[in-house]
Image (cartoon, grey):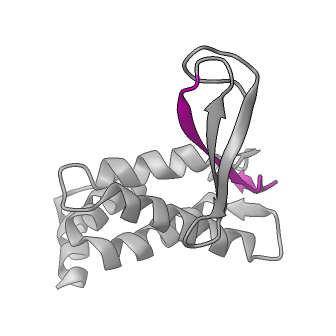
Amino acid sequence: MLCPYCQNQDTKVIDSRETENEEATRRRRECLLCKKRFTTYERVETDLRVIKKDGTVTNYQREKLKSGILRACEKRPVKTETIHNTVNKIEAELRSKQKTDIPSKLIGELAMKELKKLDKIAYIRFASVYKDFEDIGSFEDELKKLK
């Protein structure tokens, strides 16, 4: 593990524990050269692949899902930790499926389901991009469903 401060390769693990939801292992490390401490997270790498609308297949990217949810929650009273837990919950549901090829539609629907519980404004923001509203009428229809 490279030290993020001095790029030294010699580090030692001081503390290791599972995160609350047991999705990752948190390790507290110390650089043996500069003596600075830093935290790393180790999580299982999934071999999930995403089937897009046009039929192309790409590797699943956690950061892409996370950034979409972060963008929807921007300037909303939603904690970063809550967003992180939401992404973990969506990923856990994706991994529980029998198949490793997941339609992008399913990922979007899971994200909308979680955002609807989390924050209605964030949900509408995400849905407006995901559902690609054609006009103000379709936007209003979605708002009526929320009421």
Give the image quarter of residue 128. Answer: bottom left
Q: Is residue 50 magenta?
A: yes
Q: Is residue 86 visible?
A: yes
**Residue 15 percent coordinates (x, y):** 64, 53
Q: Residue at x 71, y 43 (%)?
A: 13
Give the image quarter of residue 40. Answer: top right
**Residue 138 percent coordinates (x, y):** 25, 66
Q: Residue at x 46, y 67 (%)?
A: 86
**Residue 48 percent coordinates (x, y):** 77, 56
Q: Nearer the viewer, residue 68 or 130?
A: 68
Q: Nearer the viewer, residue 41 or 122?
A: 41
Q: Which quarter of the rendered picture does the C terminus lie within?
A: bottom left
Image: magenta residue range: 35-51
Give the image quarter of residue 11. Answer: top right
How many numbered marks are there?
0
40 vs 122: above or below: above
Q: Nearer the viewer, residue 75 or 37?
A: 37
**Residue 132 percent coordinates (x, y):** 37, 54
Q: Residue at x 35, y 55 (%)?
A: 80
Image side of residue 38 versus residue 142, left or right: right
Q: Residue at x 54, y 34 (%)?
A: 37
80 vs 37: above or below: below
Image side of residue 57 versus residue 18, left or right: right
Q: Is residue 133 visible?
A: no
